[in-house]
Image: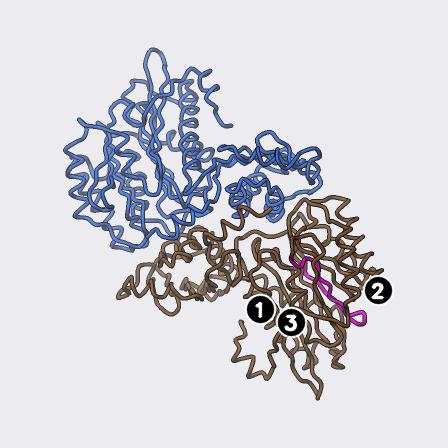
Chain colours: A blue, B brown
Amino acid sequence: MYYTLEEVEMESWKILEGGLDNVSGFSSYGVHCGIKKGKNDLAAILSDTPAAAAGVFTQNRVSAAPVLVTREHLLKERKLQLVVANSGVANACTGERGIEDARKVADLAARYFKVDHRLVAVASTGVIGEFLPLTKIEKGIEELSQLLPVKKSSREATKAIMTTDTFPKERALSFSWEGKTVHLGGIAKGSGMIKPNLATMLSFIVTDLGIDALVLDQVLKEAVNQSFNRVTVDGDTSTNDMVLILANGKSGVEVKKSNDPVFSIFREALFWLTQELARDLARDGEGATKFVEIIVRGARTKEEAQKGAFTVAESPLVKTALFGEDPNWGRIMAALGRSGIEMIPDKVSLEVNGITLVEGGMKAKGVEREEAQEAMKKKELKIIVDLGIGEGEFEVWTCDLSLEYVRINSHYS
Amino acid sequence: MYYTLEEVEMESWKILEGGLDNVSGFSSYGVHCGIKKGKNDLAAILSDTPAAAAGVFTQNRVSAAPVLVTREHLLKERKLQLVVANSGVANACTGERGIEDARKVADLAARYFKVDHRLVAVASTGVIGEFLPLTKIEKGIEELSQLLPVKKSSREATKAIMTTDTFPKERALSFSWEGKTVHLGGIAKGSGMIKPNLATMLSFIVTDLGIDALVLDQVLKEAVNQSFNRVTVDGDTSTNDMVLILANGKSGVEVKKSNDPVFSIFREALFWLTQELARDLARDGEGATKFVEIIVRGARTKEEAQKGAFTVAESPLVKTALFGEDPNWGRIMAALGRSGIEMIPDKVSLEVNGITLVEGGMKAKGVEREEAQEAMKKKELKIIVDLGIGEGEFEVWTCDLSLEYVRINSHYS
């Protein structure tokens, strides 16, 4: 289900440098308004015209104020024209005042950018329990409104939504359809509190395709399920997660029905884009030194494969062994064993980057410790566990648990 | 439900120094047989006569060979006379040969100690996937059989079952009944892979009370549920967990029926003993710098309180904040929010060591950051979350996630 670059080339899509700047009729920028010290902390993404829009939001019972306000705006009109996102303060666990503050940010942005306030999405990421510094944010919004749409930089916008991310995450591609070119661009931020059903993650995707908002909603859900929802850094889910997509139709290509051939091309392009962003999130998990794909196959069902894969991916003992480049496969077996899924230990086999470490539930014969250790030294690890009792398969993306993860998270707020 | 020392004194129990040595008719010792470098790695616990016995074993689907063999022995006779436990090699994921090896250890011990092999329990803890070094173990068993029962040291036995434990865990107490004295003693080891339904934990408890094995089985299950099953270090459950209790009747006091008054005294004494050992496990969690009690109350049900408490206790973001002495209560709120239990954020309050940090789901008024930070600096933290929507309550014991945890676990095997 994961689209490799080779497959993408076969499909004759074109992978582009950068992120949102590629897409017609969209402009974005980021500024430093003073929430964080000396770093970009406020981003705006503007469409020249109202765009069909859809969103996927955190499943956390403790939803932050901007999530509530943006969901409300989106469900009313299914259109957005502007996204305003800040980092540094999450505006979560801030009660009624938090919701009023989020509305004020939308209203301020609507006023400065001269768009309907119901077409404004707001997003926040950062420390929970603090109120938004509205005066600083107003100053930042004013500045952004003077820059956009003339001056634009997807990179500056991406930098403004970063928290402990170590690199900006931008992806873009295009494809041709009947002589016209459709673009998709996306940005995302991680990088702790990352776990299925979203994460402390924000992702904003734009396209110049024309498409109905309800169709867009459906395909976004599908895309998120097989991309962001496969990622886990630490099993923690944030209060502020949000993936938004805006489609403004500027390419001149329009999806009329969901069985249009162009729709299936767009769908796969969106899958690719969200998968790349999601994998970047795992690569940049807090303190990550390795990107790890965990594939559980041969499970009784897909659901059991998923449960097993996530249990392995979130096991602190597995993750610290990965950090230590220690081929301690017993911890993977133990994690699977406690995951609650059906398994017959004697039927399990396990490989890391093509080296079989376990066969029939035991150490594979003829594999030397040195060889196993060598396999663990790669920056990207692919761990395949075959339970050998069914057809269920699931793949998740994660990273190791390093000293740096603890350092970052013991001194954050 | 937790028995404090004050309550214990009121009950006129006597808390004793040391562990197993207090109990009549039991002797134990530990030696270095060569599995680990220069440290005790083999322990034996001997009863002068066959003792009524009960056990609780890992729920992990991947159960180690000694777990399978000991369970088999125990269920046949419900009696044990000898426990032999090694550290260094877990004898897990070792297939048929592992089971044969575990049987050989029991047979060797039976021969050297001259007891029926069905009265021997075997236990192992250490690296998964390696075979037991039987020649070394035989040598160790021979040595132990020459020492016991004349020379005995519960401390040496305890040291022989330690892995990454930093201190030996021994507890003992006695109580009087009709002019006679009943003793209970226990030892335990942690200290990673600790999670309800047991852990990489072994605990061996002995008493000179006389009691039927089936009654003993029932009270042990109860005791484990409210002690070891409340502990979580990292959410990982081991393949080798085992709690055994042996009762040899040497005190001359006998429980005839489960409504005997002496039974309820014994039951509470066992609860206290297992709770103390369990809390020691959390205190000595790998790399732990803090012991943390997490109490969730006001949940819809006890089960939901339990689920919420464990989700908080196992959240890497919560645990790293505890390590950093960072009063980042938002992470506790976020963990509860994703735990899948019913909650109304606005009704939640939260306190740490008596300082209220959250009221009505928001930062409590009048609490300065300095005051909150001061509360976090204690070595023992008591975090109480009141969800404010029901009567469900549950308490779990855990520790923080430190740099040292990652150091230990990235270089173990």
Q: Secondary structure at mark 2?
A: loop
Quickly name the residue at label 2.
Answer: B115
Q: Do tag 2 and tag 3 residues touch (Cβ < 8 Å)?
A: no
- Measure the C-alpha gap from mark 1 to mark 2: 32 Å
- Rate crowding at label 2 as few (under 14), some (14 to 19) or many (20 or more) other CA atoms within 10 Å: some
Q: Amino acid at mark 1?
A: Gln
- Name the outermost residue toward the bottom: B179
**Magenta segment:** B39-56
| Residue A74 position (above or below residue B241) | above
Looking at this rendering, what residue extends furthest in the top direction? Answer: A179
Horizontal side of residue B278 vs A80, given as left or right: right
Above or below, B154 relative to A313: below
Q: Residue at x 54, y 66 (%)?
A: B279
- The correct choice, above or below, for B256 with respect to B309 in the image is below
**Which comes before the other along the chain, label 1 or label 3?**
3
CB contact under 8 Å: marks 1 and 3: no
Q: Secondary structure at mark 1?
A: helix
> What residue is pinned by disc 3?
B19
Using the image as rendered, state which of residue A13 and residue A279 is in the foreground.
A279
Q: Nearer the viewer, residue B143 or B131?
A: B143
Q: Chain of mark 1?
A: B
The residue shown at (59%, 52%) is B237
Whole-percent x, y for residue B262 in the image: 68, 81
Residue highlighted by disc 1? B275
